[in-house]
Amino acid sequence: MKQSENSDVTALDPLDDSPIARELADLTARRKNLDSATVSLPGRTRIITVSNQKGGVGKTTTAVNLAAALANVGARVLVVDLDPQGNASTALSIPHGTDTPSVYDVLIDEFPISDIVQTSPESDLLTCAPSTIHLAGAEIELVSQVAREHRLRTALEDYLSTVEHKPDFVIIDCPPSLGLLTINAFTAAHEVLIPIQCEYYALEGLSQLLGNVRMIQKHLNPALHVSTILLTMYDGRTRLAQQVAEEVRSHFAEQVLDTVIPRSVRVSEAPSFGQTVIAYDGQSAGAIAYREAAVEIIQRYNDTHAESAANEGGA
Ligand SMILES: Nc1ncnc2c1ncn2[C@@H]1O[C@H](COP(=O)(O)OP(=O)(O)OP(=O)(O)O)[C@@H](O)[C@H]1O
Ligand SMILES: [Mg+2]
């Protein structure tokens, strides 16, 4: 049997009311809920950019694990790795050496996205437009380019209008900055997903990020909105994490997912095996949380759109 994180609670003494037994019972119940959850995909492509200019808050971890969890419920997903670090490409086991055609070629040399897309060995439904280190120069090279803020958007529009199997989701992993790469992501996307790490400086810089989203809405992409905030690396044993979570929820009640991603060793070690946590240890607490987040992201969208359809019908 694997680690205690995965053990079946039925194997435990029913009188055992220790914290670990309670945690395992909770995980088992959540796993069962997930297995019986029905999800319906909206039939149109949602383009979500995972952004936060703060470094190391869980953007890439969220982009790849959410993508894998969405593929796990039958969604077709394209991950666009817009970070020169190439961490999302690594986690999805996508080759991204210097000779690989990449997002750099799309942004600078107008390659079609279909020329650079690769399929992750994890699932046929999970594809990736990789980044290479060349992308580090793109931020500066883009400055002198025509339509420099629209390049990703145009390329994605072309891709979505020609590809045989349209993705249900495009998830863009942004670098930790608010430069032209992130602006390209904001211009191309419908939704912004902000991962927030439950720590002391969590909200610092958030107003700058939201200010940028407003600026993009005004000048480049009126459809853009912050649809989702996800609390990451949550350690419920600390008072600080609880306080940060409460504060974020009080400011952004509508956007914050009920699901919280716990700090988990499995989540952090999965990329070193070129895997998402869904493939690496799908029954672990981190994998379950990302699977729950995926279902919540689908269901919230369906609920909102059913509501607006009902309002339009009744008007
Ligand atoms: N839930 C988690 N539990 C444990 N470790 C985590 C979790 N989420 C992320 N990490 C770890 O935290 C570090 C930063 O995560 P990640 O690379 O996803 O952040 P990022 O916002 O993409 O960083 P950057 O700004 O450099 O792009 C990584 O080492 C990752 O493995
Ligand atoms: Mg990253």
Image (spheres, grey):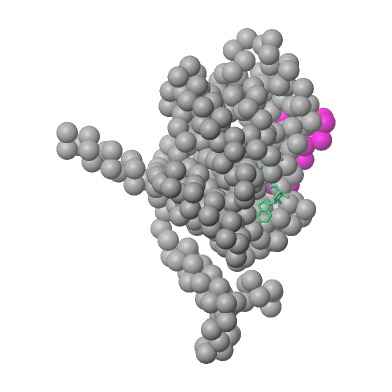
How many marks the image carries: the answer is 0
For this view, does 106 lie left or right of residue 190? right
Residue at 43% across / 47% down in the picture?
250
Q: Where residue 80 sits in the image (x, y, percent)?
A: 63, 35
Q: Is residue 74 above or below residue 95?
A: below
Is-magenta flag for residue 225?
Answer: no
Q: Is residue 17 visible?
A: yes
Asked where in the image residue 302 lies, by quadrant, the reply is top left
Q: Residue at x 65, y 24 (%)?
A: 179
Q: Position of residue 258 (x, y in %)?
A: 45, 55
Q: Residue 229: image x %, image y %?
A: 50, 44
Which quadrant, please, contains the N terminus?
bottom right
Residue 172 appears in the picture as rendered: no
297 or 127: nearer the eye? 297
Q: Is residue 202 left or right of residue 221?
A: right
Q: Which residues are magenta?
A: 92-102
Q: Which x, y percent locates residue 157?
A: 52, 24
Please check the rendered image and state whether residue 97 is part of the magenta-colored stretch, yes or no: yes
Residue 71, above or below 308: below
In the picture shown, does residue 66 fall above or below 188? Answer: below
Residue 269, by quadrant, is: bottom right
Q: Quadrant of the C terminus?
A: top left
Residue under the image location 69 percent in, 10 percent down? 144
Residue at left offset 30%, top offset 43%: 306
In the displayed orientation, state which residue is furthest to the left.
Answer: 315
